[in-house]
Amino acid sequence: MTSDALAALHGRVFTVPRPWSAAEIAGLLDSAGVFLLTEPQGFLMGRAIAGEAELLTLAVAPEARRQGIGARLVAGFLDEARARQAESAFLEVAADNVAALALYDAAGFRQAGRRRGYYATAAGPVDALVLTRAPV
C-alpha cells in the first residue's frame, strides 16, 4: 500500500483525534524502528526501539471488520516486536472503543494507565487507556 492508500484508509477509520495524512504516514515510516504490516483492507504501524514496542495505529476498513484482520495484524505486530528484541509492548486506545479494547484484551494487553480527557470529540473529552503486554 502507498502512503496515499494508507492515509485514505486511516481517514475512513479515524475521526478522533484525526486521521493521519499521507505525509505524516510517510514520515513515520522513515523513522527509526518503525514498521508496517498490511492485510487486504487493513494495516498496522508499529515501532520497536530499545526493547520496547509501540503499536502506533491499526486500521481495518469498516466493511471488513469482524473477519480476523485486526487479530492477524496484532499477532503480526507481536511477532515483529519479538523479532526486533522487544521485551514489552504498549499502545493507547480511546476508552470508548469497545471493539478495539476487546481485540487488545484477547491479545493479552492489560490496562496500565489512563490519560483523562486525552481525546477531544464532538461529544466531549474521552480518556485514553494505556495498555501493555509483557513479555511480547
Image (cartoon, grey):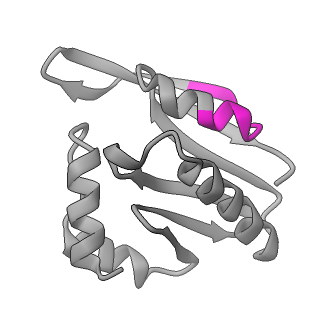
User: Looking at the picture, how far across and down is residue 9, in whole percent?
Assistant: 27, 60
In the image, residue 69 lies in the stretch drawn in magenta: no
Quadrant of the rendered structure where residue 30 is?
Answer: bottom left
Give the residue at x 53% y 81%.
32
User: Looking at the picture, how far across and down is residue 97, in whole percent?
Assistant: 43, 26
State the residue lying farthest toward the right: 135
Vertical side of 113 occupied by 14: above or below = below
Horizontal side, residue 125 vs residue 64: left or right: left
Horizontal side, residue 61 vs residue 87: left or right: left
Quadrant of the rendered structure where residue 130 is?
Answer: top right
Q: What stretch is highlighted in magenta?
A: 103-113
One can see residue 19 in this view = no
The N terminus: image quadrant: bottom left
Work out whether residue 80 or residue 102 is closer to the camera in this orientation and state it.
102
Give the residue at x 55% y 50%.
70
Vertical side of 58 occupied by 44: above or below = below
Give the residue at x 12% y 21%.
122
Vertical side of 50 occupied by 14: above or below = above
Give the residue at x 25% y 73%.
5
In the image, residue 106 lies in the stretch drawn in magenta: yes
Work out whether residue 36 or residue 51 is closer to the camera in this orientation and state it.
36
Horizontal side, residue 14 vs residue 127: left or right: left
State the residue lying farthest toward the left: 122
Vertical side of 127 occupied by 38: above or below = below
User: Looking at the picture, how far across and down is residue 21, in whole percent?
Assistant: 19, 65
User: Looking at the picture, how far across and down is residue 120, in whole percent?
Assistant: 21, 27
One can see residue 20 in this view = yes
